[in-house]
Image (tube, rainbow, N blue to C red):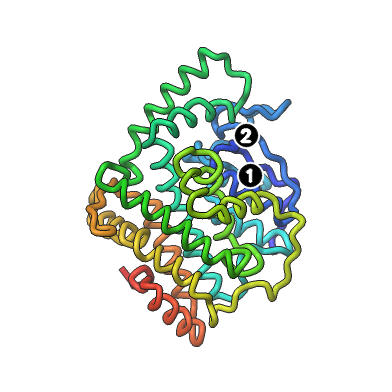
Amino acid sequence: MTTLESPIHLQGVHGSPYTRKALAVLRYRRIPYRFIIGQPGMMTDSGHIDGASLPVAKPSLLPTSYFPDEEGVDQPVTDTTPILERLDEAFDGRSVHPHNPVLGLINYLLEDYADEWLTRCMFHFRWAFDADIDKAGSVLPFFSTTLHEPELAANMKEVFSKRQIERLYVVGSNEVTAAVIESSYVRFLELMDAHLQQCRFLMGDRPGSSDFGIFGQLTCLTHFDPTPMALTLQHSPRVYAWTERVEDLCGYEVEEGDWLDPADLPDTLMSLLQEMARTHMPQMLANARALSAGEKQFETEIDGKTWTQPSFPYQLKCLNWTRERYQALAGADRELADSILDQAGLCPLVDPV
């Protein structure tokens, strides 16, 4: 086990789903932390903290944790998935990663679905509907600081909103795919609702990193943006309430036996994995093929609709990490994983390129 000094420093803003994901894990795991409010590489508004002295990661817009290197110099880390794994290595108890390797793979798949597909839903709803655009543009500037003068805040709203709307194509959102994205969110709500009628969390009666990944995206979809919030309240008040609960689980007690048994997964969890195979997997595989061919754009089909977007190198990393976790399984674990992936329709995700 490696060691990290606490409090853990995390810099970000409340409007970021990945910031909320990391904060919720720190609370649940009862790890002392200092939350530095502000966009990394830009301003901070956390009292007498010199934001300019903090190291800046690339990309700089993501929430950032600071972990010492071998020489004890703080290095910025932005990807929440390895951040949570680093915390597991450094702090005992209340892990968000199941010890069973098969359940660990399932947890990782659903965390990736949250981080890389549900975030498309979040971005689409926020910047494709007038009411959502207006709210986001008006409120988001004040997440960094409340000290903006009205004229500056109005200018930030205009500039930021325009930039984000123009970037909808990056996540595949357009007039053709809008119905795909929106219907996938409604299906997710209904599937998540069904699962929460049997289990308190995705991974059983204790939360995994996948729960916190989904929670992070839902802080925007269920509690901030008007259009998906209305859909949530219509289709699943249960999911709305669950999101409130996961914000702070420091008082929730868990035991090792609270994890699901991977040999007896509930049908409701299998349905969520099948939803991942229906939406997230096709674009992941098409993206990998495009990058292998040196193509900057890719096209595939999701739910009978043409899906086109720029190729994204980070998602290829995610796919390779998934395959590495699968390849690490052997014997009975590999057989069980194969059975689950086959039933879910996810086998192509772990097939060699």
Which amino acid is tagged 1? Answer: Tyr
The residue located at (60%, 45%) in the rendering is 20
Q: Are marks 2 and 1 in contact (CB under 8 Å)?
A: yes
Please tell me how crowded label 1 is: few (under 14), some (14-19), or many (20+) other residues with Cα within 10 Å: many
| Secondary structure state at the residue bearing disc 2 | loop
Q: Which of 281 and 185 is in front in this view?
A: 185
* Left or right relative to 330: residue 291: left
297 over 341 or under it: above or below: above
C-alpha span from label 2 to label 1:
9 Å
Name the residue that disc number 2 marks.
54
**Does residue 296 appear in this view?**
no
Q: Residue at x 48, y 38 (%)?
A: 226
* Whole-percent x, y for residue 331 in the image: 49, 87
Is residue 309 visible in the rendered image? The answer is: yes
Of the residues under marks 2 and 1, which one precedes in the sequence?
A: 2
Quadrant (top left, top right, bottom left, bottom right) of the N terminus: bottom right
Which residue is nearer to you in this view: 52 or 148?
A: 148
For label 1, the residue is 66
